[in-house]
Image (cartoon, rainbow, N blue to C red):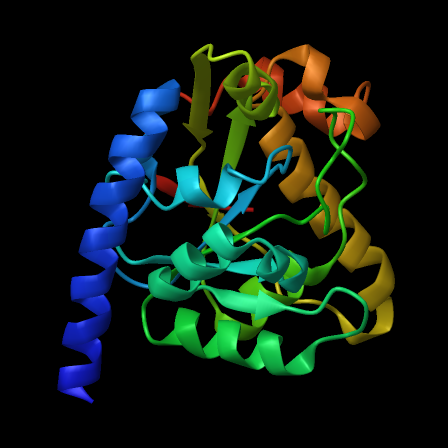
Amino acid sequence: METQASTLTGRRKVINALLSVLLHAASRIDYVGAENVPSQGGVLLATNHMSRFDTLLLALTPTRPDITALVADKYKRNLLFLVILNMAGIIWLDRTKADFGAFRVAVDALKRGYCLGIAPEGTRSTTAELLEGKPGAVLLALKADVPIVPVGLAATETLVPNLRRLKRSHVTLHYGKAFRLPALDRDNREAQMKTCTDEIMCRIAALLPEKYHGFYAGYPRLAELLAEGEFSTSGEYHL
């Protein structure tokens, strides 16, 4: 077990070094508020999703070299992504069904203290605007009993078009403060799942320029978060 862990750690260092060179050559990357990500222990990074490069950018989060992620298995069709993501130790997810196997692996990774990235929207937005969130992130966080750190990815949708024009992009990953979700009430589970999902998505939206707010534009909860201005300092707090 120790040998396998050491091998994975060694592979990850190589992958991160390679990704750093490639991604910084293609773009200027700003990691804002990365200190909000706990340096150890299980934590869920909930992000918006606009580019096939999002997972690779998230993997370079300065404070957590052990990030894994749930990634749609459609990316297996791209040989480059298949090799890199396999070496990085990500968790493949079949989005055509309720993939309980991937869910169990993700919960186990979180309970063992890993940092796990997930896009609550469930798919990549083709409009660069937030889509309605799905409850998977809520279920994972509650099952594994870990805090959530919202992450707003801005301008990642420009990476592919700019690469085709041999132009560098300027992308930003903005990390909000960690928070925990309340336990679900069995008698009101469905409504609470919706409320918790909206909470996660509004916290992501609060880290993004208005043009990305999409489905959550005009949400009262988003307006409250923006008025509170609680996303510029570190520290964990609970709902």
Tell me if residue 189 comes above or below residue 57 in the rendering: below
- Left or right, 212 with reference to 62: right
Confirm whether residue 24 shows in the render: yes
Rendered-image quadrant of the N terminus: bottom left
Give coordinates of residue 193: x percent, y percent.
77, 58
Give coordinates of residue 78: x percent, y percent.
58, 53
- Left or right, 167 with reference to 235: right
- Left or right, 138 with reference to 229: right
- Residue 94 vs residue 14, the one in the foreground: 14
* Residue at figure coordinates x 62%, y 83% from the top left: 101
Residue furthest out toward the bottom? 1
* Residue at figure coordinates x 47%, y 51% from the top left: 80
Confirm whether residue 233 shows in the render: no
- Residue 149 vs residue 223, the one in the foreground: 149
Instruction: Give the total of numbered labels.
Output: 0
* Residue at figure coordinates x 65%, y 66% from the top left: 139
Give coordinates of residue 124: x percent, y percent.
70, 41
Quadrant in which residue 161 is drawn? top right
Tell me if residue 74 comes above or below residue 235 in the rendering: below
- Left or right, 155 with reference to 166: right
Tell me if residue 237 comes above or below residue 40 in the rendering: above
* Residue at figure coordinates x 57%, y 25% from the top left: 160
Give coordinates of residue 171: x percent, y percent.
46, 19
Tell me if residue 167 comes above or below residue 123 in the rendering: above
